[in-house]
C-alpha cells in the first residue's frame, strides 16, 4: 500500500481509481476524514492549538494498511443500515397508503350501498305486490272453482235446458198449430 500525503490522494484511491461503486468510496473517504477530524479535535484539546499542515500530512502517512479496508467495511455497513432504514420507511408509507385506500374504498362502497339498497327495497316491494296480486287471482279461481270440466258440464246443462225449452216450444207450437187447424176446420164446417 502506498502512503498518502493528504486527503486528495485518499480521495483518488477510494473514489476515482476504485473498482467499487463511487458511493461506497465516497462514504469510506468520509469515514477516514471523520477519523482525521476526531484526531484534530484531540490535538487541539490537548495541545491548545490546531495541528500544523505537516502534522496532518504526517497523520495521513502514518495510517496503517488496513485503514482503507476498515473504512470500506464501515461505509458498507452504514450504507446497508441506511438502505434498510429507507426500505422500512418506504414499506411503512406503502402500508399506510394501502390501508388508507382500503378505508377509502370501503367508504365508497358504503356510499354505493344506500342507493342500491333503495333500488333493492323498491324491487322487493314491487315483487311482493305482484306476488300478492297473483295470489289473489289464484285464490279467486280456486274458490270459485271454475275449472274447464265444470265449465263444460255447465255448458252441457245449459244446452240441455235450452233444448228442452225449445222442444216444449215446438210442441206448444204444434199444439197451437193443430188447434188453429181444428178451429179453421170448425169454422169451415159451420
Image (cartoon, helix red, strand yellow):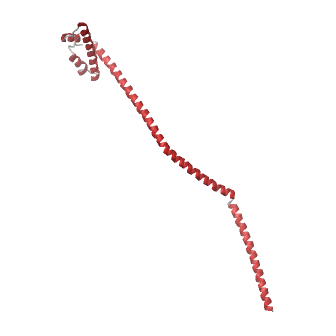
Residue at x 37%, y 24% (from the top left corner): 85
Q: Position of residue 113 (x, y in %)?
A: 49, 42
User: Which residue is situated farthest in the bottom direction here?
Assistant: 190
Residue at x 54%, y 49% (from the top left corner): 123
Number of marks in the rendered image: 0
- Lateral position of residue 12 relative to residue 89, left or right: left
Q: Quadrant of residue 84?
A: top left
Q: Is residue 140 visible?
A: yes
- Lateral position of residue 40 relative to residue 134, left or right: left
- Lateral position of residue 97 relative to residue 127, left or right: left
Residue at x 28%, y 23% (from the top left corner): 23
Q: Is residue 21 visible?
A: no
Q: Position of residue 109 (x, y in %)?
A: 47, 40
Q: Nearer the viewer, residue 47 or 174?
A: 47
Q: Position of residue 147 (x, y in %)?
A: 68, 59
Q: Quadrant of residue 65?
A: top left
Residue at x 47%, y 42% (from the top left corner): 111
Above or below — where is 141 with respect to 23? below
Q: Quadrant of residue 140?
A: bottom right
Above or below — where is 137 with respect to 113? below
Q: Quadrant of the N terminus?
A: top left
Above or below — where is 112 with respect to 163? above
User: Which residue is situated farthest in the front direction here?
Assistant: 48
Q: Position of residue 124 (x, y in %)?
A: 56, 48
Q: Quadrant of the C terminus?
A: bottom right
Q: Nearer the viewer, residue 27 or 145?
A: 145
Amino acid at each position: 500500500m502506498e502512503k498518502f500525503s493528504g486527503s486528495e490522494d485518499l480521495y483518488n484511491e477510494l473514489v476515482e481509481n476504485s473498482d467499487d461503486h463511487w458511493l461506497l468510496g465516497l462514504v469510506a473517504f468520509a469515514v477516514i476524514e471523520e477519523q482525521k477530524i476526531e484526531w484534530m479535535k484531540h490535538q487541539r484539546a490537548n495541545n491548545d492549538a490546531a495541528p500544523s499542515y505537516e502534522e496532518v500530512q504526517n497523520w495521513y502517512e502514518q495510517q496503517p494498511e488496513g485503514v482503507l479496508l476498515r473504512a470500506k467495511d464501515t461505509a458498507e455497513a452504514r450504507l446497508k443500515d441506511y438502505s434498510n432504514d429507507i426500505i422500512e420507511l418506504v414499506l411503512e408509507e406503502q402500508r399506510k397508503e394501502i390501508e388508507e385506500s382500503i378505508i377509502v374504498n370501503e367508504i365508497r362502497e358504503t356510499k354505493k350501498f344506500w342507493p342500491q339498497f333503495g333500488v333493492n327495497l323498491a324491487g322487493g316491494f314491487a315483487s311482493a305486490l305482484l306476488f300478492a296480486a297473483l295470489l289473489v287471482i289464484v285464490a279467486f279461481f280456486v274458490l270459485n272453482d271454475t275449472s274447464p270440466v265444470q265449465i263444460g258440464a255447465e255448458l252441457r246443462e245449459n244446452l240441455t235446458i235450452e233444448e228442452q225449452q225449445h222442444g216444449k216450444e215446438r210442441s206448444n207450437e204444434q199444439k197451437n198449430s193443430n188447434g188453429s187447424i181444428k178451429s179453421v176446420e170448425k169454422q169451415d164446417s159451420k
